[in-house]
Amino acid sequence: MTQKSMSSETITAKETLYESTQNYSALISLYRDVLKAKEDPSIRYKLAKTYYQRGDSKSSLLYLTPLLNDNTKLATQAKILQIKNLIQLNNFQEAISVANELLLKSPNEGEVYN
């Protein structure tokens, strides 16, 4: 079965299995294959989040970049993940700067305060 013919149900089933077993390598492969077939911002975010969970903040930031400039809820989530990545990389000044920008745009976003 090629990735293009893989149904969303199949993708969801694999995603659930890989998440429950914390198989980040398999999740990354799954998300990358889906993105090769078709660009999908939510899959891109999930890929970036999985890289972060695996401790690979540089790859996470690479995949996050296209999501950061939108004015959507997903962009807000992407900014929060960007901040977490910057902290994981010990880049605290940039993390504070991004957090302050985000708070100006979304002052009610509680996760930013953490």
Image (cartoon, rainbow, N blue to C red):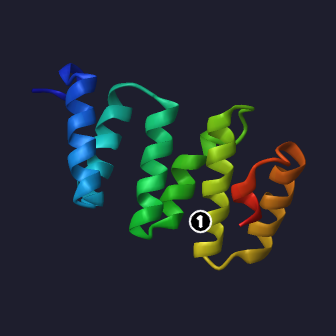
Disc 1: CA contacts within 10 A as few (<14), some (14-19) or many (>=20):
many
Residue found at the very far left of the displayed protein: 1
Quadrant location of the C terminus in the rendered image: bottom right
Residue for badge 1: 85
Q: Is residue 87 left or right of residue 96?
A: left
Q: Secondary structure at mark 1?
A: helix
Q: Amino acid at mark 1?
A: Asn
* 76 vs 90, nearest the viewer: 76
Q: Looking at the picture, how far across and down is residue 39, in whole percent?
A: 45, 28
Q: Residue furthest bottom?
A: 90
> Which residue corresponds to the image point at 27% horizontal and 48% vertical from the top-left?
29
Q: Quadrant of residue 55?
A: bottom left
Q: Position of residue 64 (x, y in %)?
A: 57, 48
37 above or below 85? above
What residue lies at 26% left-to-right and 44% top-to-bottom?
16
Image coordinates for residue 54, horizontal then vertical, percent: 39, 66
The x and y percentages for residue 67 are 62, 39
Q: How many marks?
A: 1
Quarter of the rendering occupied by the N terminus: top left
Q: In the figure, 72 relative to 4: above or below? A: below
Is 35 rendered above or below residue 59? above
Residue 40 located left or right of residue 82: left
Residue in the picture at 69% in, 75% down: 91
Residue at x-position 28% and y-position 24% = 8
* Left or right: 9, with 39 as reference point: left
When asked about the image quadrant of residue 98, the answer is: bottom right
The front one of 40 and 17 is 17
Query: Within the image, what quadrant is residue 34 found in?
Result: top left
